[in-house]
Amino acid sequence: MRAMRAALPAPRSYGHPAKPSGRPKALPRDTGVGKSSIVWRFVEDSFDPNINPTIGASFMTKTVQYQNELHKFLIWDTAGQERFRALAPMYYRGSAAAIIVYDITKEETFSTLKNWVKELRQHGPPNIVVAIAGNKCDLNDVREVMEKDAKDYADSIHAIFVETSAKNAININELFIEISRRIPSTDTNPPSSGKGFKLRRQPSVTKRSCC
Ligand SMILES: Nc1nc2c(ncn2[C@@H]2O[C@H](COP(=O)(O)OP(=O)(O)OP(=O)(O)O)[C@@H](O)[C@H]2O)c(=O)[nH]1
């Protein structure tokens, strides 16, 4: 079995912090993109339309079989609210992969996602696998971010890209499997270190079209 850590940073957020429970009426613009919902869909195969905002960060694990190996994902789901912003480096520093999530119905979440990419490149582990997930693709009718624009950007930075729907379970498993595929075997690395992976860059990512 090999272990890997995937942190889920959100785009930088602005505005008033949320109350400790329940969603605030005026949401900071980059919270609520669906990070926790993606993790819940992957780990528990469930979806809660009334899920609360993450406080600090939450941790979950899931082991999946991939080809002849067992892959254990150690997942930090980080909070998107600005007041927790400073915590993010604690989670991505030791991670083998990071999934940056934006909401396809909110252009500003895609714009600020680029700040996270820059931050990961500057302060994250050198070989961290970056995946971009355009979530809520079930809401195609109110889409603000074109899939092609996001895919072109992801290709330009050699990141994995998928559009996902945690609600309708679209491309969630595929996202994690692709991350698994991009992280080389840990045969030559201690499995518990969670870092030191040498990243094999793939020229393109196979993506199942959704919505
Ligand atoms: N339609 C739709 N709604 C979704 C989807 N994923 C999440 N949501 C909803 O979006 C809202 C926010 O979801 P969360 O998973 O809490 O978002 P988050 O990014 O973890 O939010 P923070 O913890 O504040 O950073 C909730 O009401 C979810 O039910 C999706 O794929 N489709």
Image: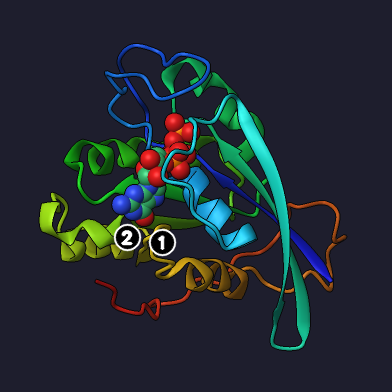
- Find ligand 1 in the image and state its quadrant: top left
Tell me the residue at 37%/62% (across/down): 164
Tell me the residue at 65%/30% (across/down): 90
Cβ atoms under marks 2 and 1 closer than 8 Å: yes
Q: CA distance from mark 2 to mark 1?
A: 5 Å
Q: Is residue 90 visible?
A: yes
Task: Tell me which corner region of the image, top left, top right, bottom left or bottom right, holds residue 96.
Answer: bottom right
Give coordinates of residue 175: x percent, y percent: 49, 67
Which quarter of the rendering shows the N terminus? bottom right
Give coordinates of residue 197: x percent, y percent: 70, 61
- Identify which amino acid the numbered label 1 is placed on: Ala
Which quarter of the rendering shows the C terminus? bottom left
Count residues near mark 2 (Cα–Cα under 10 Å), then give few for <14, some for 14-19, many for 20+.
Answer: many
- Identify which amino acid the numbered label 2 is placed on: Ala
Count residues near mark 1 (Cα–Cα under 10 Å), then give few for <14, some for 14-19, many for 20+.
Answer: many
Circle 1 is placed at which residue position?
159
